[in-house]
Amino acid sequence: MKVVILAGGKGTRLSEATTVVPKPMVEIGNQPILWHIMKIYSSFGFNDFIVCLGYKGYIIKEYFSHYLLHKSDVTIDLAQGKTIIHENKTESWRVTLVDTGLEALTAARLLAVRKYLGKHTFMMAYGDGLANINLKKLLDSHRKSKALSTVTAVQPLGRFGSLDIERNNKVKAFTEKPKGDNAWINAGFFVMEQGIFDYIHGDVLWEKEPVQALARAGKLSAYRHQGFWRPMDTLRDRNELERLWQSGNAPWKIWK
């Protein structure tokens, strides 16, 4: 099963880092967040990736073109002009890198890689979100729903602590960063059938016209993920993810 990763946006809210590299290449623990996302998928046996490139996409191409060299022990014989790989420490990934346009919206990027998808069910993820999601359960949920697309839904933490204040101004309860307002939001980690392309018309956001049309037609299902999920929208988010990684207990590290 192929996994599409949207990696073409500019990441303007993370401009401290994205003026140098595209957002999916911003590092957590000395590895791009893109690598972390791919490790999540490969831990469930999904190793065939299609990465939708856009802003500074050449940096992602260069990363993967040198990946084997960076991950292996090598002898470089300058006299013979040979490079000998002694130990291959890389993952068993197949990565297709596709330039889907600098300014293209998310649905247009999906259309641009359609020819690489074959005719089967596929998965899609954003290039800036991490979760300890059980992808096998997500896929099972999708198959049971018989929908054309299944979206992973989460209840994000509130940004601030919540106070329950009585009339006499005594604090009855204090909750540090409670679950938002009980609303479920789009966390990415989609499963899709080829029929979704019938709902894409022109250069549009996948999250607007196509998804809304699928919902109206009863063809959109949700998989409720109760565990860890974090997007990397800002420098603050990136620093929090880095802190979790350095703690040695990053919740999304579900691989060995």
Image: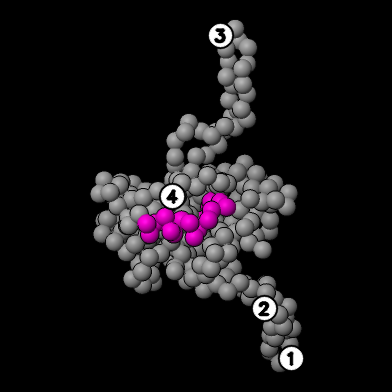
- Magenta span covers which residues? 127-144
Mark 4–mark 1 Cα distance, whole angstroms, equals 57 Å
Q: Which badge, 4 or 3, is on the more N-terminal residue?
A: 3
* Amino acid under disc 4: Tyr
Mark 1–mark 2 Cα distance, whole angstroms, equals 23 Å
Badge 2 marks a residue whose secondary structure is: loop
Q: Nearer the viewer, residue 9 or 146?
A: 146
* Amino acid under disc 3: Arg
Q: Which badge, 3 or 2, is on the more N-terminal residue?
A: 2
- In x, y percent, where is residue 66? 61, 73
Q: Which badge, 1 or 2, is on the more N-terminal residue?
A: 1
- At label 3, counting other C-alpha atoms closer than 10 Å, the crowd grade (few under 14, some 14-19, many 20 or more) is few
- At label 2, counting other C-alpha atoms closer than 10 Å, the crowd grade (few under 14, some 14-19, many 20 or more) is few
The N terminus appears in which quarter of the rendering? bottom left
- In x, y percent, where is residue 158? 55, 33
Q: Is residue 19 left or right of residue 145?
A: right
Mark 4–mark 2 Cα distance, whole angstroms, equals 37 Å
- At label 1, counting other C-alpha atoms closer than 10 Å, the crowd grade (few under 14, some 14-19, many 20 or more) is few
Disc marking residue 223: 4
Q: Residue furthest top?
A: 168
* Residue denoted by label 3: 167
Q: Is residue 221 left or right of residue 153?
A: left
Residue ID at (57%, 46%)? 228
Disc marking residue 79: 1
Mark 3–mark 1 Cα distance, whole angstroms, equals 83 Å
Badge 1 marks a residue whose secondary structure is: loop
